[in-house]
Image (cartoon, helix red, strand yellow):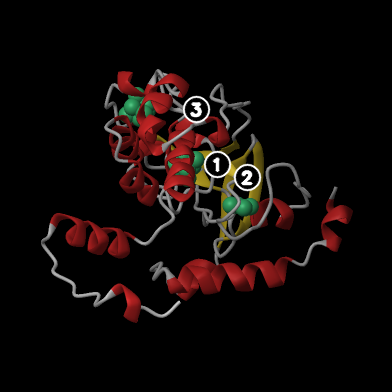
Amino acid sequence: MSGDSKNINIDSVTNSFEKKASEKKVSLKKNDLDNDVTLTINAKTIVAPASLSVIQALWHAGYPRVKGVGCLDGVCGSCSVMVRRADSNELQMELGCQLLIEEGMDVFFSVFETPSQHTYELSEINTSWDVQTEFHRIFPEAEKCRHCNGCNKACPKEIDVELGVDLAVKGRFRESGDLFIECVMCNLCMTGCPEFIDPNHVGLFSRRVTGYFHTRPSNLINRLEAIRTGELDVDIGDDDQVQP
Ligand code: SF4
Ligand code: SF4
Ligand code: FES
């Protein structure tokens, strides 16, 4: 299989990855990065330099994986993997393009089918007054959240997913949507949720309704409200002096 990997420019991807790692202040010594490590990826034994990500290590070993590989920059969420490190029995969720390989790692690409059961049309929500009712109709499982922290542990972007769901249940969609701003829709939180809430889709709904119903600037809304309540006294002059 090694012939196919010749078409892939590993160096350019590696350079971009190392730059990103350095920006994130990943503390790895140069010598550590030069050393080869042995790990398994999808049950294949791989030997590759520690400077490579999981996907790069596969390519380096001659496996031209394309399925589950997209942007290579931690943005598209295609490359979710399950990882068990040598010194731990804990299973962790990561993005394969963002994870540096380590000695003794055991990695599996996620193979879960994760279609969302929650479908809706924003245009069918008549006014912002209906959003909360509609949310509970579309996501009836959300209020059954067990607060088990499973989604938080699964999220490779370290989003407080559980809080995001909780805020949406309470109708605080703007705050909920803000929490999900870094979500890459990798679906790992879906696979970890025992109540089938689809937390990432709760986040997407929150962001969509915020954009759809609340596009006016909040400082303008607050200022108009202050004028309406009399808290702010504004002299707008005579009507006949107002220019068209
Ligand atoms: S919130 Fe869910 S879908 Fe979004 S990045 Fe985290 S785990 Fe992935
Ligand atoms: S995994 Fe599901 S049930 Fe558990 S905290 Fe997250 S949203 Fe709630
Ligand atoms: S390939 Fe896009 S997030 Fe990894």
Image x and y of residue 217, in percent: 37, 62
Using the numbered discs, state the Cα–Cα distance from disc 1 to disc 2 in whole angstroms. Answer: 6 Å
Residue occupying the far right of the picture: 3
Classify mark 3: helix, strand or loop. Answer: helix
For badge 1, the amino acid type reads Cys
Question: Quick check: 61 above or below 139?
Answer: below
Q: Residue visible at 53% across and 48% down?
A: 184
Q: Is mark 1 within 8 Å of ligand 1?
A: yes
Q: How many marks?
A: 3
Q: Quadrant of residue 166?
A: top left
Q: Is residue 222 left or right of residue 127?
A: left
Could you tell me if the residues under marks 3 and 2 are in contact, i.e. CB atoms within 8 Å?
no
Q: Residues within 10 Å of mark 2 (few under 14, many from 20)?
A: many
> From the viewer's perspective, is residue 69 above or below residue 240?
above
Q: Are marks 1 and 3 in contact (CB under 8 Å)?
A: no
Q: How far across and down, in percent of the image, does residue 20 sit?
A: 51, 70
| Depth order, front residue of 206/194 | 206
Outermost residue, left direction? 231
The amino acid sitting under disc 2 is: Ser
- Rendering coords of residue 103 (x, y %): 50, 51
Pointers 1 and 2 in contact (C-beta within 8 Å): yes
How would you rate the neighbour count of disc 1 (Cα within 10 Å): few for under 14, some for 14-19, many for 20 or more?
A: many
Residue 28 as seen in the image, left or right of residue 168 = right
Using the rendered image of the protein, determine whether residue 133 is visible from the camera's viewpoint.
Answer: yes
**Where residue 186 is drawn, which disc sits there?**
1
Q: Is residue 66 left or right of residue 143?
A: right
Residue 191, label in figure = 3
The residue to which callout 2 is attached is: 78
User: Separation of disc 1 and disc 3 at Cα?
Assistant: 10 Å
Mark 3 crowdedness (10 Å alpha carbons): few <14, some 14-19, many ≥20 = some
